Amino acid sequence: MPRSTRRRPALAHPATEEIDLLDVLHALSDPTRMTIVRVLRSEPERACGTFPVDVAPSTLSHHFKVLRESGLITQREEANRRFSALRTVDLERRFPGLLDTVLAAHAQSHAHAQSHTGADPGAEGDAQA
Amino acid sequence: MPRSTRRRPALAHPATEEIDLLDVLHALSDPTRMTIVRVLRSEPERACGTFPVDVAPSTLSHHFKVLRESGLITQREEANRRFSALRTVDLERRFPGLLDTVLAAHAQSHAHAQSHTGADPGAEGDAQA
DNA sequence: TACGATGTTCGACGAACTACGAAGTTGGTT
DNA sequence: AACCAACTTCGTAGTTCGTCGAACATCGTA
């Protein structure tokens, strides 16, 4: 008999004060993970399998682990699904303005020669970086 | 006889519009390189060998190459010295506020339980990250 | 000319990273 | 119970990364 209601080892998240900047920057420097973070910024939470990225489930699982251990996201289990959410409040507290600035930079980075069209897909439509 | 005054291959730098955010984030995610960038923020330029980092010359050279190719720094040759400088203007244009925010975050990241001492070395004194 | 100082380039090596498939776990459904 | 769906963990292949030492290039100087 299990000794508690949670069967899984319980997901490890760093405390807010323990979030390391270099870990965060490294986590964000991967295209797949950047896509995940961008999608997560426009939604409160989302199940792992529903992200517009094109990698195998096991690979995706790895990326979520990196994001979680860097402190960028939280993961919550519900039934056999795992929902991820950005730690916006914690991140804002730890590194004020960082997330906004980086994501704005990424958005601009992808506004090629079409800045006048005003067609910002905003995390929708464009998978990967 | 050399066909021009520059004997070396001439250093390659990405154009401002070509600076890639993920490359920048990756470049900044290394402790040694972050130290270099921090030092460079408080000075207009500096010779390679004068940075407070503890790695072999060849390793340092590698890090400078990564920083240069990511678009974070420029390098200028003078005699047998190579001076590096942050591309603050270009970076501000490409990714407004990014450098300031990241460096502020890093400074905060290292203000442990001593924020009241006012002893912020500010790129001086603490080698590495 | 010879030497020393400053940096770079060239392998090399181990560690870390990204990726995948196979197998396992958990929970809902038939 | 059998099955499917959603993920994770494990093992592994291939690549990239950070590091170093050895050798090389350039410039100023003894």
Image (spheres, coloured by chain):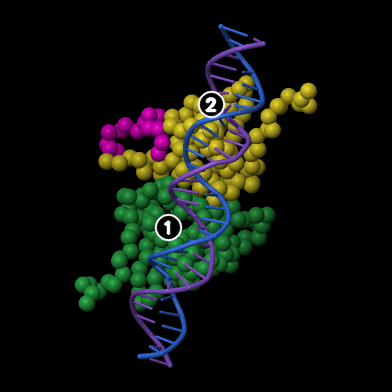
Chain colours: A green, B yellow, C purple, D blue
Would residue B112 be seen by someone viewing this image from the given angle? yes
In the image, residue A105 above or below residue B37: below
Q: Quadrant of the N terminus of chain A?
A: bottom left
Q: Position of residue B120 (x, y in %)?
A: 35, 33
Q: Is residue A31 left or right of residue B31?
A: right
Q: CA distance from mark 1 to mark 2?
A: 36 Å
Whether B119 is among the magenta residues is: yes
Residue on which disc 1 sits: A66
Look at the magenta stretch and give its main secondary structure: loop
The type of residue carrying mark 2 is: Ala
Identify the residue at horizontal 51%, vertical 47% (top origin): B26
Q: Residues within 10 Å of mark 1 (few under 14, many from 20)?
A: some
Would residue B89 be seen by someone viewing this image from the given angle? no
Read off the magenta span: B114-129
In the image, residue B53 above or below residue A73: above
Q: Quadrant of residue C10?
A: top right
The label number, if any, that marks residue B111 in the structure image: none
Q: Quadrant of residue B62?
A: top right
**Of B86 and D16, the residue lying toward us:** D16
The type of residue carrying mark 1 is: Val
The label number, if any, that marks residue B47 in the structure image: 2
